[in-house]
Amino acid sequence: MNACPVCGSMSGSPPRARICLGLDAVFELVECALCGCFFCDPLPTGEQLARCYSASYYDFDPRREEGKGMAFARRLSRIRGAGAILDVGCAAGFFINGIKMRSQWEVYGIDFGESAVRYAREELNLNVRCGELAEADYPARSFDYIHVNNVLEHVRDPVGLLAACKRMLKHDGILHLSVPNGANDVLGLLEFHRQEDRPAFSHKGHICFFPARTLLRMIEAAGFTAVRARTHGFKRGMRNAGILPKKRNWKASHEPRNPAPGGAPGEDGGRISPPVGRAHSELYYRWRLSMDYLKMAPGLHRFGLDFLLLLKHSGSAQDVSA
Ligand SMILES: [Zn+2]
């Protein structure tokens, strides 16, 4: 068995389920006896992960993502008139492009999808790198704000990712971490496997699942302090936990898939072709973002599916208003 990607312990549970990621491989899902992290055993290789992120994974609606970025820009501008933001897992860069359009902030991005990064560079003219953050040579203390939105649960080395953020974040900078509540997120996979006795498809590509206590332990070990902790996604979370009835077709998303054709993005010359959705006003996206924040409950709660944490370097923490 692989060591736990959070605490390094070799004391995992007997496999709790078998899962697949749309590759020619089935993984065991184990729970670390020491820190409570659930993870794929073995962890997929970098090459396998690259195959999970084919060009189609990046088909985000540009208008929506840019709208979110524009709305987010207002919040950033309230923290500081200008600064540097890094979006880790920036995909094709529409979100940071929205920030760029509506603020004085310099925007940077990194993603491991080659096709998405190529799009961000060539079509949007953004400063975006391809690869893992831990291997990127951004100078120490480069960024005032690092945005890590639903990335930690996808990577082989979440501790290394947080350590890289620690290194690259300015002394008074903010690390914005959105991450699923692993204890809740994992329930669908466990239940599918229990009922069907077949591998469950991890349909969002998650390979690690961090319960709140695991997450807090990681954050503290990385040298951060949470200045905000919020939970949202209560309806989906309560469905996962069986408090609300599950949707009738809930199993469909966990049905095992065949490998995506075409191999790794980049090798197949994969081009992303973002679908352009309905246009909304900028005001609409601002309203949506405000509503998203309003629906969040303070603290980290078991029955919510998603956590949002705002982190500062330990020792420099004071409350922030974004
Ligand atoms: Zn562990």
Image (spheres, rainbow, N blue to C red):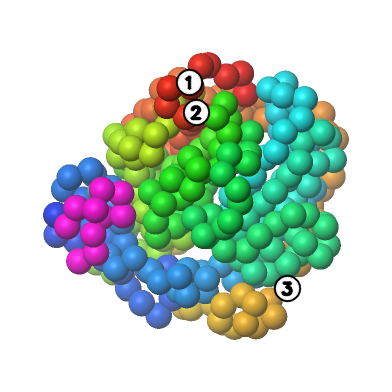
Element type where label 1 sits in the image: loop
**Residue range of the region highlighted in magenta in the rendering:** 1-10
Q: Is residue 5 magenta?
A: yes
Q: CA distance from mark 1 to mark 3?
A: 42 Å
How far across and how far down the image is residue 252, in percent? 45, 61
Residue furthest to the front in view is 139
Distance in Å between CA atoms under marks 2 and 3 = 37 Å
Q: Amino acid at mark 3?
A: Arg
Q: Is residue 301 magenta?
A: no
Image quadrant occupied by the N terminus: bottom left
113 displayed left or right of 305: right
Numbered mark located on residue 271 in the image: 3
Q: Earlier in the sequence, mark 2 or mark 3?
A: 3
Query: Hey, what amino acid is under mark 2?
Result: Lys
Q: Which residue is under mark 1?
A: 317
Disc 3 crowd rating (10 Å Cα; few below 14, some 14-19, many 20+) is some
Q: Residue at x 57, y 63 (%)?
A: 131
Q: CA distance from mark 1 to mark 2?
A: 5 Å
Depth check: 69 or 284 in front? 69
Q: Nearer the viewer, residue 99 or 256?
A: 99
Q: Residue under circle 2?
A: 312
Tag 1: residue type?
Ala
Residue at image position (68%, 69%) is 115
Say whether residue 136 is visible.
Answer: yes
**Up-down: is 297 above or below 89?**
above
Instruction: Report x, y in % for residue 229.
Output: 45, 26
Disc 2 Cβ-to-ligand 1 distance below 8 Å: no
* Residue at the spot 82% in from the left edge and 57% down from the top edge: 124
Asked whether the beta carbons under mark 1 and mark 2 sit within 8 Å of each other, the answer is: yes
User: In which quarter of the view is residue 254 placed?
Assistant: bottom left
